[in-house]
Amino acid sequence: MNKFQFCLIFIALCAGTAFGQKTLQSVYTGLGEKDCKAAKTEGDSYRGTCPGVGGYKLELLEGDLRQTINVIAPNGTKSELDLWSVVSGGFSSVGQKAEWRVSGAGKTAKPQALIVRFNASENPEDSTKITSYLVVVKISGNSACISEIVKPSADQNQKARAAADAAGGKPCRASE
């Protein structure tokens, strides 16, 4: 084998493994009323448990015309995302679907990150004007936190997936 052949084989092997990076896939679960099981409703507040992936669940909370999500790990540990403080304090709602970025497939799927849409009314002069954010949640073992907030743009979905795929190396965002 000459040096040229050796170099070609080496480059092919490195490119094929993407230098050790995992390829993540998307799995979607519902956050709508038909998808979640109501756990508590009193007055204008709501608490429901929604399906997840890999043993994780999502808890949807609503109060005072605002929504947020908690991530519940397989061991029962609850991570409060506090969307109404970290993203926006305006009237808000979450999207109808959660996008889980997972390694593996089927029963071996392991969530690495989560993407949820967060729609917020931030204009006190016109509450019908909505800003639609994509919130990237880093999942590490039994904890989860917001690592990125992607503002509206033509390539918002692609930016959110790229941020989710890199979330493991990002710090958690604090309330603003």
Image (tube, grey):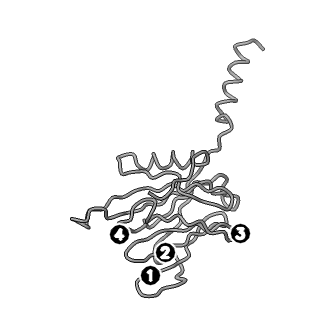
Q: Residue at x 48, y 74 (%)?
A: 61
Which callout, 3 or 4, points to the residue nearer the camera?
Answer: 4
Q: Residue 119: image x %, image y %? A: 37, 63
**Which is more N-terminal, label 1 or label 3?**
1
Circle 1/circle 2 CB separation < 8 Å: yes
Give amino acid for label 2. Answer: Leu
Q: Which residue is under mark 4?
A: 91
Q: Is residue 69 above or below residue 154?
A: below
Q: Which residue is under mark 1?
A: 45
Per the model, the C-alpha gap separating discs 1 and 4 is: 14 Å
Drawn side of residue 113 relative to residue 16, left or right: left
Q: Residue at x 51, y 54 (%)?
A: 136
What is the secondary structure assignment of the residue under circle 2? strand
Image quarter (top left, top right, bottom left or bottom right) of the N terminus: top right
Q: How many marks?
A: 4
Give amino acid for label 4. Answer: Phe
Quarter where residue 15 is shown: top right
**Disc assigned to residue 61:** 2
What is the secondary structure assignment of the residue under circle 4? strand
Circle 3/circle 4 CB separation < 8 Å: no
